[in-house]
């Protein structure tokens, strides 16, 4: 039998109108906020692109095996094998590895809540919202806050008896250079580490026995039939590997290189990569981020206009089919307003940052607004 809880809430027409009117203020804030977000994003994109172009021109290729003082303060590109001396060790579980990084991964068997909501409109403007809450037992990192569940009784998640943890070797070197903490944080070539059975018995955790099974540890009575609160403890390691670095040489280490527009370059990538390929990758990431924020800004504006126009659809919901038609109409209008306004904002930003591209784009947006106005006027004449 499914472990679920169903909640049905019916909201009256007048309450819905009141709520939609309150939403107008939120909608206005969202629309207003979208403009600076879109404008700022274009400036950020242009500055990042310029600084990456600057970095590509000024970057010096350096030999990791030789420390060249002539490159002091310059943006350098270095490739080589990242290595370290010594052994990383988790004393609690008697696990050790001659690695760049060691990570303890703890997962707890616990409750997870999933929700599914359906809405049905009724004649008279009422709205019936049915939400189904289902509860499943899953293995998950950290603790899912069961206090926020709709039905907490019988679904309580205990505190995690022991947490995940990671270690990094110090120093980690590439030839004659020592990696900075920031560059070390970008080493991500983790693979599973099959650990041997501890020589000594592991001390109980929270009064519970720790069991070793096939390269991992288990905290609980029966791994084949886990109980809420049981833990699985596994390990991962990042072994010595080839890396490629773009950063400013600072003595025998590295620091961020700052372009004229304020963008910093301080990057490590696992593997052997040319400076050009690393800059190309950074430019592509900048483009993806730019488009992501553009979509976010448009969506913010669109949702804002939808909230502002929501009372019209609610009023029409006295007859559900009428409300649906009006809702579709307000959605179309919200889109037709958001698209050109977003385009105009981007164009204005480009006029400020890239005038040769921004001015034609601004003209295109103006034509879109003109088309929308003419369409609205044509509809008015058709109905008069």
Image: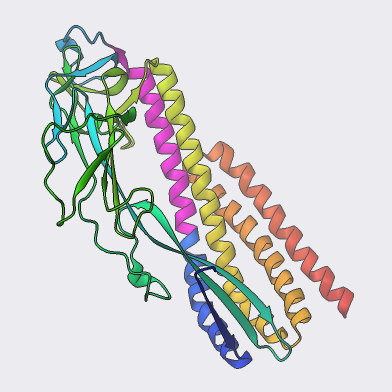
Identify which residue is drawn at 63% across, 83% down. Answer: 128
Tell me the residue at 71%/91% (across/down). Answer: 124
Q: Quick one: quadrant of the C terminus?
A: bottom right
Answer left or right for 20 relative to 262: right
> Which of 45/119 is in front?
119
Query: Which is more toward the observer, 177 or 8?
Result: 8
Q: Residue 37 lies in what quarter of the image? A: bottom left
Is 105 left, or right, of 253 in this rendering? right
- Name the foreground residue: 88 vs 22: 88
**Image location of residue 213, percent across then percent down:** 29, 38
Residue at point 58%, 87% (across, down): 11
Query: What residue do we see at 59% from left, 63% from top?
Result: 302
User: On screen, 143 above or below 120?
Assistant: above
Find the magenta span and give its range. 35-61
Q: Is residue 293 rendered to the left or right of residue 332?
A: left
Residue 267 sits above or below residue 27 on the image: above
Characterize the magenta stretch by its predominant secondary structure: helix
The quadrant of the picture occupied by the N terminus is: bottom right
Tally of numbered discs? 0
Residue 52 lies in the magenta-colored region: yes
Q: Is residue 256 visible?
A: no
- Can you give x and y, in whole percent of width and height, for residue 7 in the image? 53, 80
On the image, the x and y values in percent for residue 332 come to 71, 65
């Amino acid at each position: 039998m499914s472990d679920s809880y169903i909640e049905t809430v019916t909201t009256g027409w007048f309450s819905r109108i009141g709520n939609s009117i309150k939403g107008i203020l939120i909608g206005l804030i969202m629309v207003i906020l979208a403009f600076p977000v879109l404008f700022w994003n274009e400036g950020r994109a242009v500055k990042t692109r310029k600084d990456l172009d600057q970095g590509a021109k000024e970057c010096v290729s350096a030999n990791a095996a030789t420390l060249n003082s002539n490159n002091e303060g310059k943006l350098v590109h270095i490739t080589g094998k990242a290595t370290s001396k010594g052994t990383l060790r988790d004393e609690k579980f008697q696990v050790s590895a001659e690695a760049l990084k060691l990570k303890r991964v703890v997962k707890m068997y616990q409750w997870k809540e999933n929700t599914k909501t359906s809405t049905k409109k009724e004649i008279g403007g009422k709205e019936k919202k049915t939400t189904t809450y289902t509860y499943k037992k899953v293995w998950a990192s950290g603790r899912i806050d069961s206090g926020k569940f709709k039905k907490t009784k019988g679904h309580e998640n205990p505190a995690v008896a022991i947490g995940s943890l990671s270690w990094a070797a110090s120093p980690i070197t590439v030839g004659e250079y020592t990696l900075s903490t920031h560059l070390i944080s970008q080493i991500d070539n983790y693979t599973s580490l099959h650990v041997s059975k501890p020589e000594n018995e592991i001390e109980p955790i929270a009064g519970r026995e720790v069991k070793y099974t096939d390269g991992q540890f288990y905290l609980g009575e029966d791994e084949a039939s886990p109980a809420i609160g049981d833990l699985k403890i596994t390990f991962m390691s990042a072994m010595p590997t080839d890396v490629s670095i773009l950063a400013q040489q600072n003595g025998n280490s590295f620091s961020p290189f700052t372009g004229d527009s304020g963008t910093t370059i301080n990057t490590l990538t696992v593997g052997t990569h040319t400076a050009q390929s690393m800059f190309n990758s950074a430019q592509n990431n900048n483009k993806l981020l730019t488009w992501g924020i553009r979509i976010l800004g448009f969506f913010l504006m669109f949702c804002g206009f939808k909230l502002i126009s929501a009372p019209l659809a609610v009023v029409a919901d006295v007859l559900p089919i009428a409300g649906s038609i009006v809702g579709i109409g307000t959605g179309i209008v919200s889109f037709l307003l958001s698209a050109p306004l977003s385009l105009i904002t981007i164009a204005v930003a480009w006029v400020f940052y890239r005038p040769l591209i921004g001015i034609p784009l601004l003209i295109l947006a103006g034509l879109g607004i003109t088309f929308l106005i003419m369409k609205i006027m044509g509809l008015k004449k058709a109905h008069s």
